[in-house]
Image (tube, grey):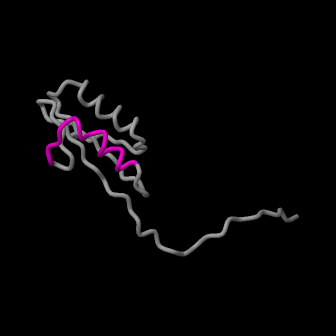
Amino acid sequence: HAVNIDLPRATNQPQDAKPETIRLSVNAHGEYFWNENPIPDSELVPRLQAEAAKEPQPELHIRGDKEVRYERVAQAMAAAQQSGVRKIGFITEPQSK
């Protein structure tokens, strides 16, 4: 017995568009850095909105200093989500044994 299945068509075009990665760091004083460049709080949301509008959308990697108040990292994460950024990751140091 055969089962009729309408399969999707595949294209053999290579996917060249690899999304970039944005590195958002928060230092021990709570200051934001966009790809290692300092930015004021007022620039954070407009930059995140601009990145969220790109296709493919870049990934956002958030690095928070272990001495910074968690609130500053949470504010950055909330701003990213409200701006429409879908791929958010956290960068941590591996635990040494």
Main SS, magenta residues? helix
> Against 7, is 79 above or below?
above
Residue 58 position in % (x across, y down) = 36, 53
- Corner quadrant of residue 70: top left
The reply, left or right, for residue 83 in relation to residue 96 is right
Q: Is residue 96 visible?
A: no
- Quadrant holding the C terminus: top left
First to last magenta residue range: 37-52
The reply, left or right, for residue 55 in relation to residue 90 is right
The reply, left or right, for residue 23 in relation to residue 36 is right
Please count the marks in the image. Answer: 0
Residue 43 position in % (x across, y down) = 24, 41
Farthest-out residue, left: 29
Identify the residue at horizontal 12%, vertical 31% (top origin). 28
Q: Is residue 69 visible?
A: yes
- Quadrant holding the N terminus: bottom right
Q: Identify which residue, 37 or 65, lies in the foreground.
A: 37
Q: Identify which residue, 51 or 73, lies in the foreground.
A: 51
- Does 50 lie within the magenta span? yes
Identify the residue at horizontal 19%, vertical 24% (top origin). 69
- Corner quadrant of residue 15: bottom left
Identify the residue at horizontal 30%, vertical 28% (top origin). 74
Farthest-out residue, bottom: 12
Identify the residue at horizontal 32%, vertical 46% (top origin). 60
- Does 71 lie within the magenta span? no
Residue 63 position in % (x across, y down) = 23, 39
Residue 68 position in % (x across, y down) = 17, 28
